[in-house]
Amino acid sequence: MSLRLHSKYGVNPTIPVCFVCGKPKNEVVLLGAGYKEEAPMHLCIDKEPCEECKRLASKGVMLVEVQDNTDKENPYKTGKIIVVKEEAYKHIFNTEVPPKRIAFIEETALKKIMGDKYGTEIKETK
């Protein structure tokens, strides 16, 4: 595989970030001429979850909080993430588990579900 160099920025590297949590992935992507401008230091290049999000999703269903009325294709994430058991997800939402076990939930809906626990730090349990 070859990479066409950008005339001004050469290999034009970037560090991909996770679409789900927004944290940097442990890799570097060389964009070259495929990116018209200078590549930013961090860039979301796909919707594939990072290893940590995959690990969390393997424990249940990740509920990723997003701002109310946000863009459905690129939702604005607030940074709050909780993991619920698969059975709880099906019971609460009356639907099947999403394919990658990750669902975006608006802030007001998560507040209703969490009740008094909303805003408190909940530690990961085994």
Image: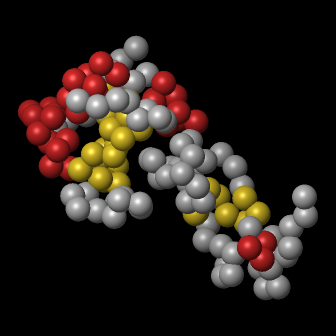
Looking at the picture, does residue 122 appear above or below residue 69? above
Farthest-out residue, front:
95
- Image quadrant for the C terminus? top left
- Report the number of numbered marks: 0
Position in image of residue 96 (x %, y %):
34, 29
Viewed as shown, does residue 19 lie left or right of 67? right
Residue sitting farthest toward the top = 126
Q: Position of residue 123 (x, y in %)?
A: 32, 26
- Write the residue at 90% across / 58% down: 1
Q: Is residue 3 visible?
A: yes
Is residue 122 visible from the viewing direction of this image?
no
Which image quadrant is residue 38 in?
bottom right
- What is the quadrant of residue 77 in the picture? bottom left
Where in the figure is residue 87, as x and y percent of width and height?
Answer: 30, 18
Res 33 → quadrant: bottom right
The residue located at (15%, 49%) in the rendering is 108
Viewer-proximal residue among 51 and 90: 90
The residue drawn where x is 17% and y is 44% is 109
Q: How is the image coloured?
A: secondary structure
Residue 26 shown left or right of residue 106 in the figure: right
Residue most extreme to the right: 2
Say if 20 sits above or below 120 in the image.
below
> Extreme bottom residue here?
8
* Residue at 28 percent of width and 25 percent of height: 90
Q: Is residue 24 above or below residue 33?
A: above
